[in-house]
Image (cartoon, rainbow, N blue to C red):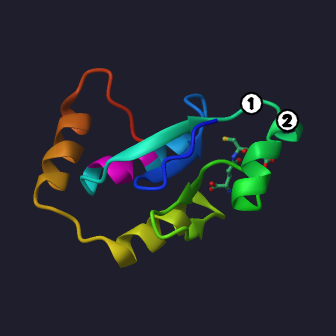
Amino acid sequence: MPSEPGLIQVFQAEWCPYSARVRQRLNELDLPFVALPVPAAKDERSVMQERTGTRTIPAVILPDATVLGGDAAEIITELDKRFAEPPSAQAQRDQLAAHPLGRIIG
Ligand SMILES: N[C@@H](CCC(=O)N[C@@H](CS)C(=O)NCC(=O)O)C(=O)O
C-alpha cells in the first residue's frame, strides 16, 4: 500500500457509505487526497491497523501525521475545524441534489 506523506490519506472503500461521506466532505473542502482501498474483511486490515490504530473505515491521516478516526461525523467535524469551506462547496451539494442519480448519504 503506497504512502503519500504530502497528501491527505483516506483508508476507505467504495462500498462503505461512511467512507463516501468523508470523501464527499474532502471534495467540498477542495482538498486533494489519496484514497487507500482496504480489504473487505476487517481482520485483514493489518496495514491500516499499523498506520492508524484502527481497522474501522473511514480513517484519515493528515499531512502532519494526525490520525482522524471514529465516526465519519467526528472525522468531518475535525476536518471542518482545520479547513475552511470554500464558496464552491455549496455548488457541489447543489449538483448532487439535482443529479438524477444523486443520493443523500447519512
Ligand atoms: N459509526 C461508524 C461506522 C463505520 C463503519 O461501520 N464502517 C464499516 C464499513 S462501512 C467498517 O469498517 N466496519 C468494520 C468494523 O466493524 O469496524 C461511522 O459513523 O463512521
Residue at the image position 75 percent from the left and 29 percent from the top:
40
Placement of 17 over or under 69, stated as above or below: above
Residue at the image position 24 percent from the left and 71 percent from the top:
84
Give the residue number, with chain letter if any, for mark 1.
Answer: 39
Is residue 24 within the magenta segment? yes
Q: CA distance from mark 2 to mark 1?
A: 6 Å
User: Please, what is the dominant secondary structure of the magenta stretch?
Assistant: helix
Which contiguous range is marked in magenta? 23-27
Query: What number is the disc on residue 44?
Result: 2
Q: Residue 23: x percent and y percent?
A: 43, 45
Quick one: 102 or 28, which is closer to the camera? Answer: 28
Mark 1 Cα-neighbour bin, 10 Å: few <14, some 14–19, many ≥20: some
**Circle 2/circle 1 CB separation < 8 Å:** yes
Q: Amino acid at mark 2?
A: Glu
Q: Is residue 105 visible?
A: no
Placement of 14 over or under 70, stated as above or below: above
- Asked which secondary structure carries label 1, the reply is loop
Placement of 86 over or under 49, stated as above or below: below
